[in-house]
Amino acid sequence: MRLYKIIIICTGLFLFSCKKEQPEDPGNTPVDQFNNGVLVVNEGLFQQNNSTLSWVNFATETVNGAIFEQKTNRQLGDTGNDIARYGGKIYVVVNVSSTIEVLDAKTGNPIKQISMLSNGIPKQPRFIEFYNGKAFVPCFDGYVDVIDTLSLEVIQRIPVGSNPDGIHKVNDRLFVANSGGLNYPNVDSTLSVIDPVALTEVGRIVVGKNPTRIQSDMNGDVYVITQTGLNTLNTQLVKVDHQALTVETIYPLPVNRMERVGANFLLYTSSGNTSSLQLFDPVTGFVINPNFIDASLFTTFYGAQYDSSRNQIYCFDAMGYVNSGYIRVFSSNGTHLKNIKVDLNPSKLLIYE
């Protein structure tokens, strides 16, 4: 959701009786090693300190919603935004708590909690990306922090634009969306280009107001969601040539979320009271299926991830932001397969084969 947008929570009742629902594990059976499942980060509620991790075991068809507490004997924190795996470790970015939890990728056992404070002030880390033994973390205070993945120490801060949000690696460059969302209406409108070897910003591209999420296509070109103007919540999809570092095409699509699915993009579009989950071909620049997934199956669509090993799409449903969320699983052709109940506001997951 946009950083400056006031969320009005609406309640609704949706019945999914025709699809299988994976049961919760009432005893939260301890897990020795992660295998054949997904590890989900649930954001929880802002300033409620109730972010969690849910382990979904596909073999036993159960969900353990207390996996982090079992492994660490403490809570995860406030507003977990991202989870990623690199070099045998899991990194969980906890935005409002300003921490990064580092866990063993096989067992989930704790390795280190990295404090993301600057002179006692929260940096508010957002997402995480990796390159050649280093982690890169955009922080809302205007920097991308560089973490050595061996020492797990912050070794440098790279100044970028206002309230950097999304980050994405393409070849030997990192692209960072400078949202400026906390300064609304004086939002930012740029992507920072970072050299991950020199650890410096080497360029800045004007793409449109309040850029947030970033993806890339099979050719390496970059796509970012921006606003269409200063005083509007309408959005658009902007394509950036990754070599020329210039805007190539602007697609007038009201995109709120996007996820790459093979060679195509799954776009969640919303305009007025109408929403849809479309399949977009970045090669032709056309929507090839305007209703690829049935958007009416969702109370609050909150993102998606593609599992290439199982050829499935995991879509997050935040269920009005105040109820336990769901992962709604779809085949690669958009067929609804099952629902998995997790915790509050699921937003990202790790896939284990």
Image: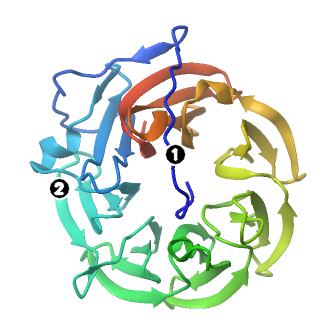
| Quadrant position of the N terminus in the picture | bottom right
Query: Residue drawn at (61%, 82%), measured in percent from left and top?
Result: 192
| Left or right: 151 as drawn, with respect to 221 | left
Colouring of the image: rainbow
- Could you say whether the residue bearing mark 1 is in a helix, strand or loop? loop
Query: Residue drawn at (34%, 48%), measured in percent from left and top?
Result: 45
Query: Residue drawn at (61%, 80%), measured in percent from left and top?
Result: 186
The residue tagged 1 is: 8
Q: Amino acid at mark 1?
A: Ile
Numbered label attached to residue 110? 2
Q: Amino acid at mark 2?
A: Pro
Numbered label attached to residue 212? none
Query: Residue drawn at (74%, 57%), measured in percent from left and top?
Result: 234
Give neighbour class at mark 2: few <14, some 14-19, many 20+ (Cα, 10 Å): some
Q: Nearer the viewer, residue 46 or 289?
A: 46
How far across and how far down the image is residue 328, in percent?
A: 52, 28
- Could you say whether the residue bearing mark 2 is in a helix, strand or loop? strand
Q: Is residue 82 above or below residue 279?
A: below
| Left or right: 330 as drawn, with respect to 104 | right
